[in-house]
Every structure is written in structure tokens, then in C-alpha cells.
Image (tube, rainbow, N blue to C red):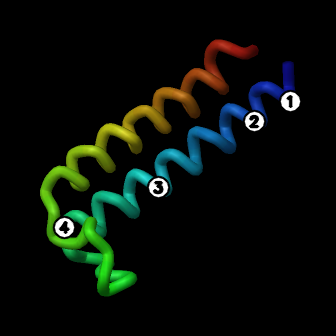
Amino acid sequence: MAAMRWVMTVVGVLAIAMGVLWMAQGAGLFPYPQSSFMINQTPWIIWGGLLALVGLVITWGAGRVLR
């Protein structure tokens, strides 16, 4: 059970980090690489926010449900 909690926490944190990165690229705050199709594109702000929210739910669920 502890291994499952650890795996879910890692997956949740990675999802949060990726979501924040997508949001930053969509907003034009992180324009790397310069040829990225995600830069200054509003849909990536929304998708990134949703992914970060899913990551929060997974991380919360790992600590709450798997006790």
C-alpha cells in the first residue's frame, strides 16, 4: 500500500508540474523552445490548468484514500 501511495504521489506531482509548464507556455511566460506550437495559445492554458487540477486530485487521493 505504501508503494502505491508513493507512485500516486509522484504521478500527481509530475502532472502538476507538467500542467504548470503548459500554462506558462500557453501564456507566453516560458517561450522555450521558440518553435513550440504551444506558445501564446490560450487552449494550452486551459489544458494545463485541467492537468494541474487532476494532479492535485491524484496527490490528495494518494494521501487521503490510501491510508
How far across and how far down the image is residue 32, in percent?
37, 82
Distance Cα–Cα, label 2 vs label 4: 30 Å
Say whether marks 2 and 1 touch (CB < 8 Å): yes
Q: Quadrant of residue 5?
A: top right
Which residue occupies 65% across, 25% down? 62
Find disc 1 in the rendering and name its residue: 3
Of the pair 4 and 67, the residue shown nearer to us: 4
* Sequence-earlier tag: 2 or 3: 2
Q: Secondary structure at mark 1?
A: helix
The residue to which callout 2 is attached is 7
Q: Considering only order in the chain, which callout, 1 or 4, is on the residue closer to the N terminus?
A: 1
Q: Which mark is residue 18?
A: 3
Marks 1 and 3 in Cβ contact (< 8 Å): no
User: Type of residue at label 3?
Assistant: Met
**At 16% from the left edge and 63% from the top edge, which residue is drawn?**
41
Residue 51 position within the rendered picture, expressed as x and y whole percent measured from the top left: 39, 41
Mark 2 residue type: Val
Residue drawn at (30%, 82%) of the image: 35
Left or right, 39 with respect to 11, comes to left
Mark with earlier residue (2, 4): 2
Under circle 3, the secondary element is helix
Tell me: residue 5, above or below residue 44. Answer: above
Mark 1 / mark 3, whichever is N-terminal:
1
Q: Mark 4 — residue?
A: 27
Secondary structure under badge 4?
A: helix
